[in-house]
Amino acid sequence: MKLNPAIQEIRESATLAINQRVSALRQSGRRIWHFGFGQSPFPVHPKMQDALRQNAFRKEYLPTLGLPELREAICSFHREHFQYEFVPDRVIIGPGSKELIFQALYLLEGPLILPAPCWVSYAPQGEICGKPVVPVVAGKTDGYKIRAKQLRAAGRELPAGQKIMILNSPNNPTGAVYSADELQDLAQVCRELNIIVISDEIYSHVCFNGAPAKGIGLFYPEGTIVTGGLSKAFSAGGYRLGFLAAPAEMTGFIEAFVTLASETFSCVSTPVQYSAVAAFSDDSDVMEYIDQCTSLHHAAGEYLYERFTEMSLGCVRPEGGFYLFPDFVPFKEPLGRLGIAGSPDLCRYLLEHVDVAMLPGTDFCHRAEELTCRVTSVDYDGGAVHKASVAHPKLDRAFIEANCHNLKAGCDALKEFLESL
């Protein structure tokens, strides 16, 4: 048997692999503090669940673009919260934004520029599509956000013609959020160098400054494809529903996308699309729930940031999402005496000897010697914690330690390990 060479060098997604590994270890009786997998722990809102149940009888194929009512709702929702002027006929519904990003990369010509650290699947997707992948590594002093001058320098080294960049804000793995000024600067470079942006805005409502995160599409609408979905703010990753919105200036893109989708996934589950209408209808109950869940993500992220800082780990304060990106550089010498030379060694050691699961920075296009790890802040019972938070006046450190026991225990185990070095 022969396999496509484009896939033979690609490993299983690191995030999915660590989740399966931790599940297996826990089932075997090991107590593992799971800082490795980014799944929102909160229940799906009851109105979304009700819509799913009420439409469970629907079995018909929907148009490949998606349910018209849902596409209208997505446009209205993003006009209200993000000032985007999406058009329903240029919005397509897919089985998660991850699949939509992959199909967009397959359709678009040009090398792929990745501001790094970046999500684990971007580079493998580009490689599967046969694209040159060009990481542009942001520094910790810049909050792990690339600057316009870095993007310009990287773009000018590439051949003339169309290029692609995936920009993710709020960011996985760092928790960074790009400001309006930073996005404007990047947009100017993208216009200069003919860079099409895929703006991955799956965390756009999980932003800690009190408002949804701004996207680069506000400043570069003619060259930006926006993706989003249900998995993060709506806590419905397993529903597998995402959307992609493209501008009118990208002539033929949606038509080509529909053709490709019609020969691959055909359409997304019909009952799930009806459930998504409830999510994107701007219902006040659903939006209040999202805001409360975001407040809990913020509190959990702040807790881990404070604990890591107290341990003398290098860490940038998260501004959105449910991720942190600490580095263990201050402990490089004693870690070296344990045979730990890079982030993969570090994460293996922490899982085997400290019972803490993290992912190495190398999975996110970051250098091994930087000793960075991607940490998630969601290892707790979301339903119980949300219920406790409704009656609690302050989501402070005491609240997290009283209600998110695994976060505290994982930090305690990590602290004990570092103090032993």
Image (cartoon, rainbow, N blue to C red):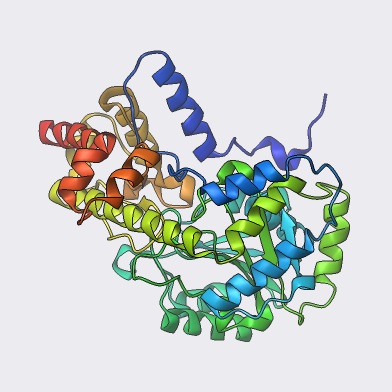
Using residue 31 as the reference point, say whether residue 108 is left or right of it: right
Q: Residue farthest to the top?
A: 28
Q: Residue at x 25, y 46 (%)?
A: 328
Using residue 333 as the reference point, say whether residue 343 is left or right of it: right
In depth, the one of 290 and 211 nearer the eye is 290
Using residue 98 as the reference point, say whether residue 398 is left or right of it: left
Q: Residue at x 34, y 70 (%)?
A: 209
Q: Let me know if residue 194 appears in the view.
A: no
Total numbered badges shown on the rendered structure: 0
Placement of 354 over or under 315, stated as above or below? above
Placement of 103 over or under 14, stated as above or below? below
Residue 56 picture location, percent across and down: 73, 40
Q: Let me know if residue 394 appears in the view.
A: yes
Residue 410 picture location, percent across and down: 25, 34
Residue 104 picture location, percent across and down: 73, 61
User: In what quadrant of the picture does the C terminus appear?
Assistant: top left
Using residue 29 as the reference point, say whether residue 124 is left or right of it: right
Q: Residue at x 25, y 35 (%)?
A: 405
